[in-house]
Amino acid sequence: MRILIDGVFFQLAQSGIARVWKSLIPILNSHPDVSIVLADRGNCPEIEGISAVPFPAYHASYAADDSILLQKLCDFHKADIFLSTFFTTPLKTPSVLVVYDMIPERFSFDLRDRFWAEKEIALSYARRFVCISKSTKTDLLHFYPEIPDNNVRFNYLGYDKSVFRRMDRVDIEIFVHKHALQRPFVLMVGSRDQNKGYKNGKILFDALLKSNRCDLDVLCVGGEETFDESLIAEIGSRFRVLRIEATDHELACAYSAARAFIYPSLYEGFGLPVVEAMACGCPIVTTNKGSLAEIAREPACIIVEPDSVEAMIDALRLLDDENCREVMRAAGLRECLQYNWENIGQTLYETCKDALEDAGRDTSEAFYEKWKTLRLIQSQVNTKAIF
């Protein structure tokens, strides 16, 4: 089975989805009947045993032309199956699509935006789907009821056990000293706001300010590069807010050193940072929204209502108790053991096999001809238009 993987997401960002594919590609490639070609649009990692070929950078405004080029690449490498790391499509090679979340649909993003329009196109084109949680599968079938239920599988993501683990005292001390973290701190990872505010990070700052806490600092790893000026003015000298970029090793040190990981999101397709925090023995404060209801369990996590500042204040107060934190650490270290990349890697492999069997008895030639015609027409008109 020859699989062409479009590494487009590596060009766009190095965040969680990039971590997903860096883990999945070697598992797919471990099957003796699989050969993989990776289209490298820039920033693709070197993966042992994977042939990477240069490919033009992606821009949503030229997505129809991009489809034409992708099909030429599929034809050249005689690809049986096409996988995209982020919503690109060829013209006729059968596609299996990994669906991470339905956040744009749930939070009423402007779906006329060409970037999100291409997601709808990819969902319409794909033959089979793999979702990264049960709630993502439920949402996919809710927004696209025409997709047959038996064409959609789900399995949970894993984490890198060699990286995300309880770090030893020396590593923690080096990390803490490097960033002058002289007081207890709570940790936030990734975006604190995001489109429509669904990451909901403001609730932590509201809770600290309302409760007049002056004994906890806030460390933010990644996410927005700046803080709201009015927020910083209100915080003043009450507590320190620090933002850093971090390697995976440093992130594991941050989880291991933090009093708690705060993740008050209104929706997640999976919530990989929650599992990584568990693996590092970090107590967690989060919500039960989206897939978080599937992976965030007490006593490893304190579950709060995402709009309740008082609930966040109470959670921070509970975390003042070292015995409470120790119970949470131990529970998280047990909970995280059920998550591994092999499970979803096997699901993706089996789904690709199903798509290949579908192609063997295919009656979709007429669909692909119409699809090709549509993309050729799109490539000839105003690239800013919405289709």
Image: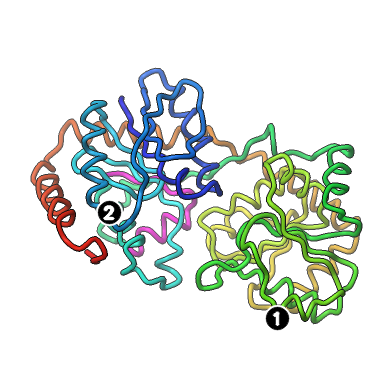
Where does the magenta region start and end?
127-143
Using residue 126 as the reference point, say whether residue 211 is left or right of it: right
Location of residue 253 (image quadrant): top right
Secondary structure of residue under mark 2: helix
Residue 99 drawn in magenta: no
Q: Which residue is pictured at 82% across the width and 77% down the height?
A: 236
Between the C-alphas of marks 2 and 1, the distance is 39 Å
Residue 136 drawn in magenta: yes
Secondary structure of residue under mark 1: helix
- Residue 213, compared with residue 48, is above or below; it is below
Q: Nearer the viewer, residue 189 or 330?
A: 189
Please rate how many residues cluster around mark 1, counting C-alpha atoms within 10 Å: few if below 14, some from 14 to 19, many from 20: few
Q: Which mark is residue 340?
A: none
Please rate how many residues cluster around mark 2, counting C-alpha atoms within 10 Å: few if below 14, some from 14 to 19, many from 20: some
The mark nearer the N terminus, 2 or 1, is: 2
Rendering coords of residue 126 (x, y %): 28, 47
Using residue 191 as the reference point, say whether residue 255 is left or right of it: right
- The residue under label 1 is 230
Q: Which residue is pictured at 17% across the width and 52% down the height?
A: 375
- The residue under label 2 is 62
Q: How is the image coloured?
A: rainbow
- Residue 356, compared with residue 41, is above or below; it is above
Rendering coords of residue 326 (x, y %): 86, 51
Q: Which residue is pictured at 43% across the width and 61% down the height?
A: 102
